[in-house]
Amino acid sequence: MVALQYLSRRTAALLVTLVIACTITFVVFHIIPGDPALLMLGTEADPEVLTGLRQELGLDLPLHVQYLNWLKAVLAGDLGFSTRLKRPVAGLIGERLPVTISLAVLSMLLTLVISIPAGAYAATHHGQPIDYIIVFASQIGMAIPHFWLGILLILLFSMYWKVLPPGGFVQWSADPWKAFLSLVLPAFALATHRVASLTRITRASMLDALTQDYIRTGQSKGLPKLSLIYKHALKNSLMPIVTVAGMQFASLLAGSIVAEEVFALPGLGRLLLQAIGYRDLPLVQGIALFIAIVVVLVNFVTDILYMILDPRVRYK
Amino acid sequence: MPWLLVWLFVMLTWLGLPVAAAGPKSGGHLVVAVPIDPDTFDPHKAVAAATREIDYNIYQGLVSFDTEGRIVPCLAESWETSDDGTVYTFTLRPNVFFHNGRSLSTEDVLFSLERVRDDATGYPMMWPKQIEEIVTLDDSSIRVQLKAPYAPFLSELVDAAIIPKEAVAQLATKPVGTGPFRLVEWVMGQHVKLARFDDYWEQGLPYVDTVTFRIIPDPATAILNLKAGAVHVIPRLSPDVAWQVEQAPDLKLLKGPMNTVQLMAYNLDREPFSDKRVRQAINYAIDKDLLIEGAAWGYGTKIGSNMSPVVDLYYADLADYYPYDTAKARELLAAAGYGQGVSVTLSLPAEYDLHVKSGEMVAAMLGEVGIEVNIELVEWGTWLDRIYTKRDYDMTIVGFTGKLDPHTALNRYTSDYGRNFSNFRHEEYDKLILEGLQATDIARRQAIYSRCQEILAEEAVAVYIMDPNDLVAMRSDVAGWRYYPKYVDDVGHVYFDK
Amino acid sequence: MAVVWKEKQLEAEGRGKERASLFQPPCKRASRVNICVGAVMLLAIAALAVISALSIVSPPNAMDIRARLVPPSKEHLLGTDHFGRDLFSRVAYGGRVALKVGLGSTVMAALLGVSLGGWAGYRGGWWDETIMRIVDGLMAFPGVLFAIMLVTVLGPGMKNTILAIGFANLPLFARITRASFLSARNTLYVEAARALGARPRHIVWRHVFPNSIGPIVVQATVTCSTAILTEASLSYLGLGIQPPYPSWGRMLKEAQPYMGRAPWLVLVPGLAVFFTVIALNLLGDGLRDWLDPNTR
């Protein structure tokens, strides 16, 4: 029951966040100058045709009416129609999702696989050279701009050693191996910063956990070291790791705009950038809503994980 | 006697072989890299230039254009114009088939043209309003009556695709036309795949079996794919990366004009541009040759007025009207009262790399004569809104794409033109444009438009910089690429020359 | 709840960080080394920026088409770009831009964020809920994305870039300040002060604020380095700083087509960003250790 209460409170809070995020998007995009009709029809278009198009797009209605209409539609499950591409927004997002999701998953896996062991190792070998090396490496990793890294990777792996494709994406359905190859470099570029960050967090919270009393108790009780580390220390230090990993995954799913630019990947980030450029308001709002939902969902899952990992949370 | 025959046979085959080998070979799968998706395959609703690029190969109109921009027969075998220029009578070409198998009839032409005229369709151009009525005379002729003489009519007609009535409902994604290729597959953001239409009316064409237009927005990626052989042609290559093509032994670079006018426009209603001397001074202060070298790596043709040399029938060569002369520039500025210098803003559309680079060079050059230029990068959406529509700017650089008829290229400077964002007003110019619109005699039109271009140069209405080259990078074994004064990719004449 | 744990995580990281110095076993000395190294590196960047301002080197915008894409030589220490402009002076000038944007947006984010978060944390109740919901809403957008949206609204240029990035980073300051204020509110010394009859403003300034300042300062260095990275991303995408003013991100974008024949154009600006960001990170780490009362 307490768990249910907790969850419902969290859900309510998250929904409010969602609505606010949508409102922010809507407001921001109606302040921007730029007429979608003119953008669609170009410099030669006739004024009559432009007015007609604006009416068709519903751009001449007062702002709050437009917002409410949109909100109503969203609640009914309809994300609207892209004004430029003339297709349903939901469909467009769906098309880009495979790329963004694959990249996000690949990057996240890479991050988790490298940073958690590295951070744990550094913490357990605290004060030894390997610790300093790992910390040093993560300092470097956090400072490298990921798009610069991407460019350098392309330079190295696609231009000098022609091993990997320089960008672009082939559908998974068409050629899975090639699709995977084209995600390798971007996944690396995106993972670097995240690996550095997550390693530090893991190390820090492991160190924190390792100095706790219960570890010392366990040690004096004669528990095997490995079990101490993994069953007790790591498990108890998972909270911050889960938090940060969750945030990282959410931001990956939101589509990494710059990485997609560098590697020419047809993902969500690029779609958003183009939509902003063309003032394709329904598409922008649809994607912004999607991103907000993703972030909120990830937070939600994180909260559930907290609940599982640490029963004390429910009673707060 | 037998010897003679044998000798003749040998000679003929020996002579015949290279001839056969030199001609275009059939077959092959061509891959062309294009940066943007088409927006729709309904030819009467498409607005993106990128769409026309591809659907040129799927749809055709009554008339078409050749590489010089002259109007040539297409679905209409011939036509007659009345003396007063208001009645056009077209004779339809026989034995033309649509991609769905049906043969072309005058009914289709009537339907298509009426659809273009219909407000409900949303055809983006205004010229259909000039049509009074369309009548089918018999099985193979159709007559179009205009409200008044309209000289650019035929050149506008090239964009009115003829479609079969029954295909209208699905036209956006399942185009049916009469062109050399039919659409096989369109995966948005990925590629557009065309296949040869076997019953195409023009004998022998097309050569290749399939054409895949791959959507690759990033030029660097496109080139790497070209080098790898995954792509065969990249039209309109950015001059920044042309060096990569020139360096590669198995690639070649074609250069041709684009029929685009790149210019730096002034807002003539603002100080200091209302003073002709200032505008002329700026013209003298800009070294166009160096600019073309610096911003476009030399891949551009200098121009002097709002027309490109491509449409050679009407082009007046004014490219050296204002030779580079900083002393003269300073003189004129001083005479106009700006000897102490002046500060202006140059608004540039951020997405157009060439204009941004040109702008940077212009700023540097004008700085040398005492004009302080503040560069302002403006997003395209904002550019169209603030600068093009609201005319809230000092100077800006933009490119106007190719037109076939001089009227449509030059009428944007008339006082009552809705998009005369330069705010240019000139009585003689307005009169001339009106006359040229209705004139039917080519010689008279040539004189008119020549004078118009001269006026633009005399009054220094803008700095007409260049017609940027259309650089086409292709693999060495590809041949048959044609340059047209319009934004199209003609893959019907392309073949592999192995 | 998630908020509480996030704050705990930041705390944990902080304590763990005490051992995360580059060179020495964990102690105060180590943190000072970090601060020194970081500060020295930053000073180097600042020096470059000053040099460029004094025009000791050739102006960053002087074009020389005949000398384009020249490799590093005696005349041009780091070579020239596609317009023949000297890369060294452009990088130096770019340092000015980076520092201005970094500092400007950090100050903005800090001022706004701390005020909002402090107000929410101290007053609690309805204020707290509302402000934090809005802050959460803002945080739903990844940083670069939010900055892009704002720059599109406001238009490009240095001022607007600072505003956009500042706005995008204020939620973090709000969160941290609020957390500090919340926990301080319940400490003994505040209770004591209140019992003694001290006015709320006095309590905030004399007691709560000084104890919260540590995390805020540390966050400021983090925000500064994030801001520089975000600005680089923005100008890479073509938004943000206008030409011809050099911005490291923009220089990277402009250099990309010539990657194969002028790799120095791509290496140098990236290294500049890297160097500055590491400097800021080291400084931040050092400061965090130094200010943390738990460090020996």
Image (cartoon, rainbow, N blue to C red):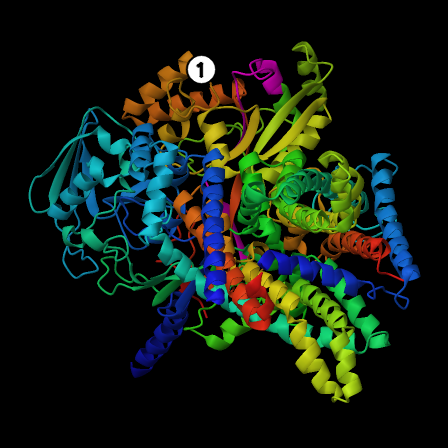
Left or right placement of residue B300 versus residue C288 in this view = left
Residue sticking out furthest to the left:
B138
Which corner quadrant of the image does residue B115 belong to? top left
At 50% from the left edge and 69% from the top edge, which residue is drawn? A102
Residue A99 visible in the shown view: yes
Residue B308 visible in the shown view: no
For label 1, count other residues whose C-alpha is less than 10 Å away and answer few (under 14), some (14-19) or many (20+): some
Residue position for label 1: B425
The chain that hosts pointer 1 is B
B221 is higher (above) or lower (below) than C141: below
Residue sticking out furthest to the right:
C29
At 72% from the left edge and 21% from the top edge, which residue is drawn? B370
Is C96 in front, or is C34?
C34
Amino acid type assigned to the residue bearing label 1 in the image: Arg
Magenta-highlighted residues: B253-280
Is B118 in front, or is A291?
A291
x and y percentages locating residue A159 in the rendered image: 64, 66
x and y percentages locating residue C233 in the rendered image: 64, 50
B268 falls in the magenta region? yes
B298 falls in the magenta region? no
x and y percentages locating residue C120 in the rendered image: 62, 42
Left or right placement of residue B478 versus residue B434 in this view = right
